[in-house]
Structures are given as structure tokens and as C-alpha cells.
Image (tube, grey):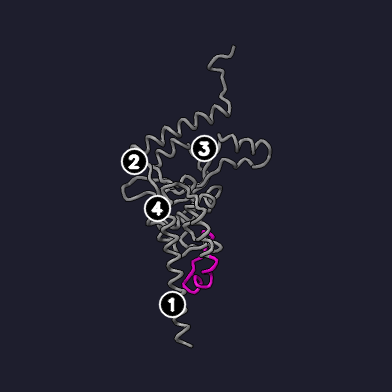
Amino acid sequence: MTSINEYTPTNEDLWELYNINFRSLMAQGKILEKIETFDSEIFKKIRNLYYNNIPAVVLLLENDFVQGKCFERSKLLAYALRSESCEIVTAKIDGLKYNPEYIKAYETGQVDDNYATHCYVRRKEKDGKTWVYDTSMGLKLEESLYNMMQHPEIISIEKAPKKPQSTGLREYNEAKLVEKSFYIQDTINLIKVHSIPIREEYRSILINELNQIDSKLNSYKEEKEVTYGKKM
């Protein structure tokens, strides 16, 4: 008979324990106001940024563009925050380390031993507290709470990018927006119909930001038509 001291927890045990701990800390964090959604002001700062005609706000709030893209999205979010105290942290976290799906992928050679590596933004704010912005969760959490959830094993820390090009995006001026307006508006219309935001709380923000972009594009196109008519 195996004594309790000799028992080695299985991967399934560790995953179950992780989820119990995660759910408990999420509940506590909400009650103690240690968990917040992203400030809507962030998205106003990236209205002119695009990736292959996809508005940057979509890359941060639309589920299909977020999951599996933590490195790219953390860079974008860090740029949007425009803070000297912002850092981009790469670390191994429990939520990936003990996930049976990723463990199986590793054991069958589909992924390498970096499968548990995650990326997030860390920022010290005016209240003196340090917060973690996790783009995969779509939330900001007090770092102490996040550390209890994920027990990050930090691999590297880098400063936030100061130019949009560092995020892989391009800043579109008025002329570029008019030139690309058909493709951008087509993308916007598709997302409005099929939108699955990273969190339901962001649905209205996402739609509002897309409407703002759409309105701007229509305004630019109308101005161009008026100017062209006068020249004729």
C-alpha cells in the first residue's frame, strides 16, 4: 500500500488543483477589486493603427485574433499604454504548464518544451501597485494575485515599444485610410456580424470603436468627393 507521503500527483491532479486555485482566486480578486477590464481609453490611442487593413482594436478584443498571439498582442497593448513603467514579461505559467492539451501536444512532438511560455504586460501605476495586463484573459490583475494564480517563472523582461512599427502594425494617415477604405470597411462589417469578443464586457466597446473608424472613413471619402467636384 502506498503511503500519502509516497504519492506523486499525476498531470490530471495538477490540472485539477490549478483550476480550483484559479477559480477561487478569480472570485476573491473580483470581490477585492484586484481584477479589472482594460480601460476603454487604451483603444482610442490605437485607432490609426492597422495590420493588413485590420484595425488594431480588433487585434486586442476579438477572440480569434487574440488567442495564441500573446507575444504580438502584449507588444501592441504595451505600446497603447504609453507608459515608461510598462514591461513585457515572458514567463512559463501554470495555466499552460499543466494543461493536458499542451502536455499531450508536447509528448507527441507537436510542440517543443516552450509550450508553457506566455507573455504579458506588467505596469506600475500611480497608486503604487503593479498590475499585470494579460491579453489572453482580456483582464488586468494585481501582480500579487496573478502570481498566486500562475506562479510565473520569468524568462525575460523587455521595455515597451515606443513606435507602432515595433508592434508589426502601420499607422494609416488620411490618404492611406481613403485608399484602403473599401478593404477596411469590408473587414469591419464582417466583424460586426460575426463578432466574438475576448470577453462579453468588450462587445459594446468593440462595436463603438469600429463605428468610430467607419464614420471617419465615410467622412474622409465625402470630403474627397466634394474636393474632386470643385476641381471639375
Circle number at residue 79:
none
Disc 2 on helix, strand or loop?
loop
Badge 2, how many Cα within 10 Å: few under 14, some, many 20+? few
Residue at which label 3 appears: 95
Alpha carbon distance from label 3 to label 4: 26 Å
Q: Earlier in the sequence, mark 2 or mark 3?
A: 2
Q: Earlier in the sequence, mark 4 or mark 2?
A: 2
Task: Identify which residue, 90 or 27, lies in the foreground.
Answer: 27
Residue at which label 1 appears: 223
Which of discs 1 and 3 lies nearer the camera? The answer is 1
Labels 3 & 4 near each other (Cβ < 8 A) = no
Residue at which label 4 appears: 85
Disc 3 on helix, strand or loop?
helix
Stretch of the chain drawn in magenta: 167-183
Where residue 15 sits: x, y (%)? 53, 31
Q: Residue at x 56, y 36 (%)?
A: 97
Is residue 70 magenta-colored? no
Is residue 178 magenta-colored? yes
Where residue 37 sits: x, y (%)? 39, 47
Q: Earlier in the sequence, mark 1 or mark 2?
A: 2
Disc 4 on helix, strand or loop?
loop
Alpha carbon distance from label 1 to label 3: 51 Å
Residue at which label 2 appears: 33
